[in-house]
Image (tube, grey):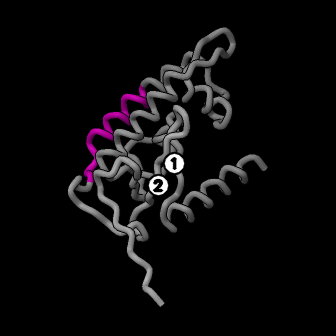
């Protein structure tokens, strides 16, 4: 029987986002990137995260006669602490958190672009990025990412019960 070929990915491949599990330096209430325990480890992944944040922030919603960006709108739906905040205060906090997360992203220690790694490993969460119309879909590409994704989805489901 033929041995399965080991899939290698390059760190500069824009079709993959690579993360490690960890904690951000600051704590966040609104910025969903900062609420995640997934820390980007490649330049392309950082750029992907920044682009995603821009798309969320550029989405606007009107709540109580005030226009808010997507981060604030999502936080109001999911975070009881934000639900209790004054809406203008939540918008100000989002702006502060956005600046903090950008600073953190700009100061991460990243893997070299000329490095490569096996796709199947348990050190890094790897997601396959695919364009679907104007949206980038992120699909777990290795067992570690799939396991983490399932656990995160379960936490969200449990929070509604």
Residue shown at the point (40%, 55%) measured from the top left: 19
Element marked by disc 1? strand
> Could you tell which of marks 1 and 2 lies nearer the N-terminus?
2
Q: Which residue is mark 1?
A: 138
Towards the viewer: 74 or 135 = 135
Which of the 4 quarters of the picture holds residue 60?
Answer: top right
C-beta proximity under 8 Å, tags 1 and 2: yes
- Pointer 1: residues within 10 angstroms few (<14), some, or many (20+)? some
Question: What label sits on residue 155 in the rendered view?
Answer: none
Q: Quadrant of residue 105?
A: top left
Q: Residue at x 40, y 58 (%)?
A: 20
Percent across and percent down for residue 133 are 55, 34
Q: Is residue 109 left or right of residue 35?
A: left
> Up-down: is 113 above or below 137?
below
Write the start and end of the magenta stretch as one range.
96-110
Task: Give the image location of residue 96, x and y in percent.
Answer: 42, 26
Residue 76 within the segment the image draws in magenta? no
Give left or right: position of 48 versus 70.
left
Is residue 105 within the magenta segment? yes
Please determine whether, in this image, residue 21 is positioned above or below residue 134: below
Q: Label 2: state its secondary structure.
A: strand
Residue that numbered label 2 is attached to: 127
Crowding at dot 2, Cα within 10 Å, few <14 / some 14-19 / many 20+, comes out as many
| Residue at the extreme bottom of the image, as rendered | 1
Q: CA distance from mark 1 to mark 2?
A: 6 Å
Q: Position of residue 51 (x, y in %)?
A: 41, 33
């Amino acid at each position: 029987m033929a041995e399965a070929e080991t899939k290698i990915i390059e760190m500069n491949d824009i079709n993959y986002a690579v993360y490690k599990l960890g904690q951000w330096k600051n704590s966040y209430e609104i910025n969903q990137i900062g609420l995640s325990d997934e820390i980007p480890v490649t330049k392309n992944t950082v750029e992907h995260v920044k682009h995603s944040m821009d798309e969320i922030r550029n989405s606007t919603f009107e709540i109580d006669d005030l226009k808010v960006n997507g981060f604030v709108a999502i936080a109001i739906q999911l975070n009881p602490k934000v639900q209790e905040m004054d809406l203008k205060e939540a918008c100000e906090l989002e702006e502060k958190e956005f600046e903090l997360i950008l600073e953190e992203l700009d100061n991460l220690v990243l893997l070299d672009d000329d490095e490569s790694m096996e796709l199947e490993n348990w050190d890094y969460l790897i997601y396959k990025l695919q364009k679907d119309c104007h949206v980038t879909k992120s699909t777990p590409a290795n067992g570690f990412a799939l396991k983490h994704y399932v656990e995160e989805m379960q936490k969200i489901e449990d929070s509604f019960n």
